Image: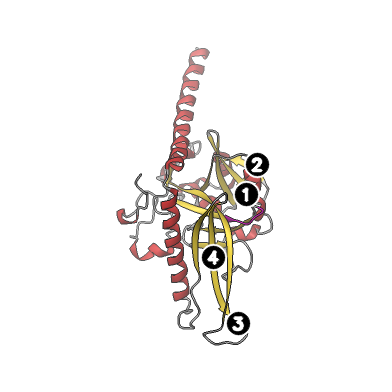
Amino acid sequence: MKKVLFLVFWGLFCHIASFAHDGIRQLVQFYESADMDGYYSMAQRNINEDLSQLYRNGGCVELKIPIPFVEITNEQGSGKLLHHTYKYKGQIHNENNFNEQIGTEKLVPMLSIQFINTGNYKSGDNLYDYIRIDSVIVFSMVGLDKRNRIQSFWHFDDGDRGYEPVERFSIFHRQPDCHYSRYSKKLPSAYRRIRKENPTLLLSNYHIRNKGGMLYVKGDSIYVYDIATGKRMELNSYVKTNFSTEQIQAFDKISVPNIYEDKWGNDRKAGYTPQELINICKH
């Protein structure tokens, strides 16, 4: 009887594990077959639209302050580079006197994921079963300097803003107010530590990043690198340690990118994306 029960439980475990592994394989296969040039082009367009919107709403147009912009290029041997340009007033304050500052960062893509139907989540559920690709953002990016230190996050990593710096004062003179800013001393080296794990893929999720975690895939598991402690935990363990059941059940509530605010309906839940905002590139 014990042997039979063991076989039943072992079979159930293998079924659950296999389902989770299939989901991870699908994420990796999507990334490996993705038209990254197309997604980078979309990201450049969206980031510039977001920066333009930010400056228009901030009254910078009336003050005749040029809008900052980014350009993503392909540098041989360096992968994708993002060049961000900001023009600011010199000591003589007239509209023709601007200094130009240009920064360049190496981009690493992070596949953006959501958790759907988490209102049904129960303690003991495998979170892998709730994961889907974010069809609006698709890919966020982390910007690195020449020493692979994190400088910024691009394309709505926080769910709503196109650009977010790590430093207290950035090239665009924006102060970060997200949860990552609390770890500004530890965050720059986070990517280098994750890279030592030889991850297959970096992931991005609004709820995990707001706890100060960075997601990545290795083997058949998803891990969270905890910036505050410098330690890694498997996703299920991390979430159960850092979130209550009620908080996990709210994971399907999403933040909407600023540039889509006017186009989105009232139901801002994962899995209810308006058809015209789905940005999955067709292969």
Mark toward the start of the polypeptide (2 vs 3)? 3
Closer to the N terminus: mark 3 or mark 1? 3
Left or right of residue 113, residue 221 in this image: right
Q: For residue 261, which quarter of the picture?
A: bottom left
- Distance CA(mark 3)–CA(mark 1): 35 Å
45 part of magenta stretch: no
Q: Which residues are magenta?
A: 143-147
Q: Earlier in the sequence, mark 4 or mark 1?
A: 4
**Which quadrant of the figure contains the C terminus?**
top left
- Residue sitting at the far front: 76
- Residue 221, given in percent of the width and then of the height, sits at 54, 36
Q: Amino acid at mark 4?
A: His
Q: Is residue 62 visible?
A: yes
Q: Is residue 135 above or below residue 174?
A: above
In percent of width and height, residue 265 lies at: 33, 60
The residue that mark 3 highlights is 90
Q: CA distance from mark 2 to mark 3?
A: 43 Å
Q: Which numbered disc covers residue 191?
A: 1
Q: Is residue 144 magenta?
A: yes
Contact flag, marks 2 and 3 (Cβ < 8 Å):
no
Q: Which mark is residue 84?
A: 4
